[in-house]
Amino acid sequence: MASEGFERFFRRSRSDEAARPAPLSGGLAAEVDARRDWVWSSVSADTPLNRNDDRTALSVIVALLGEVRADETWKLQSLGIVFGDVLARVTGAEWVQVDDERGTDAALRFGGPDDLAFPMTMLSKRVEAGEEVNVLDLFRSVATAIGEAQAR
């Protein structure tokens, strides 16, 4: 699954300077934070939720995913940001910004400078395509693929 998993979940950035990952810029960092805030403020809980607890975060994603429609791309991608936060904590990946011919995107960099995952769209693309998404299975698969890629 190493190469198949890698290709299924990630894309390599082009090696030219225009596509080089860089730290999140102020504008993109603010957008990512706003998406996180939406996710966490959309959950009603008797006590404040720990945003850094991976099980809590994945449970929140599962709960909200059942309420978000396939045409609500912004909300789906916001869930993808929190999904990426969990991946980053578990794998040691870091959030970066990628500017290329497709625009500017938030991505997780792991391994080499061109090893990128785009969790913001991992959920939205699947939901919009009509796929049933098992968040925990997807998380395990992506985290495993990142780990295998990091071991290379």
Image (cartoon, grey):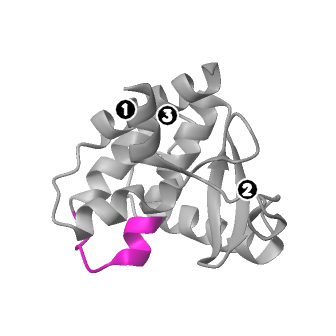
Q: Which mark is residue 54?
A: 3
Up the image or down, 59 lies above or below 73; here it is: above
Up the image or down, 40 lies above or below 28; here it is: above
Q: Earlier in the sequence, mark 3 or mark 1?
A: 3
Q: Earlier in the sequence, mark 3 or mark 2?
A: 3
Judge from the rendering whether residue 84 lies leftward or rightward of residue 29; answer left or right.
left
CA separation in Å, label 2 and label 1: 21 Å
Where residue 139 sits: x, y (%)? 39, 37
Judge from the rendering whether residue 36 lies leftward or rightward of residue 63; answer left or right.
right
Where residue 94 sits: x, y (%)? 71, 44
Which amino acid does the dot numbered 3 rest on?
Answer: Asp
Judge from the rendering whether residue 115 lies leftward or rightward of residue 137; answer left or right.
right
CA separation in Å, label 3 and label 1: 16 Å
**For numbered disc 3, what is the local secondary structure?**
helix
Compare residues 110 and 81 and report the one nearer the observer.
110
Q: Earlier in the sequence, mark 2 or mark 1?
A: 2
Q: Which mark is residue 71?
A: none
Which amino acid does the dot numbered 1 rest on?
Answer: Ser
Does residue 31 belong to the magenta stretch? no
- Magenta part of the chain: 67-77
Q: Quadrant of the N terminus?
A: top left
Where residue 51 sits: x, y (%)? 56, 45
Q: Quadrant of the C terminus?
A: top right
Q: Which residue is mark 2?
A: 96
